[in-house]
Amino acid sequence: MAIGAPNHSLDAASHVALVLFSAGHTLAAIEARHVAGLAKSAHLPRCANAEYLLLNAPLLSVAPTHWLTLQDANGAWQLGVTGDVVLAHTPITELFPLPSLIAARHVSPALRGLTMANQTVRLLFDGAALDPALTLQP
Amino acid sequence: MTNTHQQRDNQSLSLEEALARQSNDDTIIDVDEPCQQLVLFRLAEQRFALPGSAVNEILNGDQPVYFVPGLPASTEGVIHLRGNIESVVTLQALLGLPPAEQTGMLLVVTAAGIRSAVRIDYLEDVCEIPTSALKPAPDTLSSQLMPYVSALWQPDITPAESGEKETNGDSVEGSAAIALLDPDALFNAYQQGLG
């Protein structure tokens, strides 16, 4: 896993460690404590493509380039992501809770918040709430 | 003193009288009439209103809206507003209206414990009207509008005031009834997946 740009102050109370990645063309992140590993290929029996699992994308626009290992009650599983995978200590001032209507209408019940940096939105998902067997309803 | 001056003196008021008259003038205004502030706007050429108490802010429609994938078309995305993130929704789908073709304006609305920006086509006015001028929504209202309209207001516009042509009897172009929307009902419906 690559290490993100160094932060000048890594006060644990003011930053959250996030694993940044893309789901297709969408920027996304999961709290680093939910990510147990990173692989170039899928090797576990349970795996899911992030674009489908997080966004209910009907067609996979971009094939996964990396596979994050996550844990749930049934053991380890892999999440296929695209683009660079970066560990970043994000200042809490850059994290925004999800507006109520977005939370109510988003296809993924695991969406928890957003970050905005450089006029770009990144979706923050709860790694513990992801279920690789979940079929999302639009 | 000339006669003219005497006549003027006879007509002029003492300060006491003037203040008393002013005081009397104040009582002419019926301040006890309960009023409601309305934000009037248009959506798909139809006239609507929201209670002023529910509208926190009116923004230009050209605010950058950040698209959030995984949402229905009626949720445009989010705006960054002074350090906070607000959702941006459109009402057309919920109200059974054709989609908007202009950026219009954004009303930041709080209702049902939810705060969100709502895109409108055109802001007409912000005004205060007597509550008695609001009439119950008629049964003839479309079934899609009925759950969200709490009252109708027919503005009193005479042809002379509007500068528009009278079309029939007492109806004047541009004075169509305004549907007062219930913001709680709108946001509750959105939360339940409608629209």
Image (cartoon, rainbow, N blue to C red):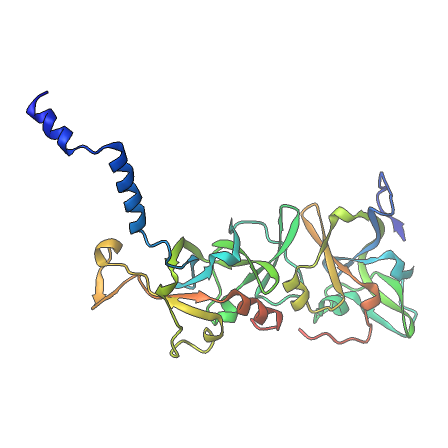
**Rendered position, B158 above or below A8:** below
Q: Nearer the viewer, residue B152 or A120?
A: B152
Q: Residue furthest front?
A: B16
Q: Residue furthest left?
A: B3
For the image shown, how many numbered marks are present on the structure?
0
Relative image position of residue A38 (x, y in whole percent): 90, 60
Relative image position of residue B103 (x, y in whole percent): 49, 54
Where, by quadrant of the figure, is residue B6 drawn?
top left
Quadrant of image for the C terminus of chain B: bottom right
At x 69%, y 69%, the residue is A107
At x 45%, y 70%, the residue is B149
Q: Nearer the viewer, residue A110 or B40?
A: B40
Describe residue B136's horizontal placement relative to residue A79 as left or right.
Answer: left
At x 49%, y 71%, the residue is B148
Describe residue A97's horizontal placement relative to residue B89 as left or right.
Answer: right
Q: Is residue A39 visible?
A: no
Relative image position of residue A88 (x, y in whole percent): 84, 49
**Rendered position, A69 above or below A11:** below
Relative image position of residue B16 (x, y in whole percent): 27, 35
Q: Nearer the viewer, residue B44 or B25?
A: B25
Where, by quadrant of the figure, is residue A125 drawn?
bottom right
Q: Is residue A62 visible?
A: yes
Quadrant of image for the N terminus of chain B: top left
Describe residue B179's horizontal placement relative to residue A133 as left or right.
Answer: left
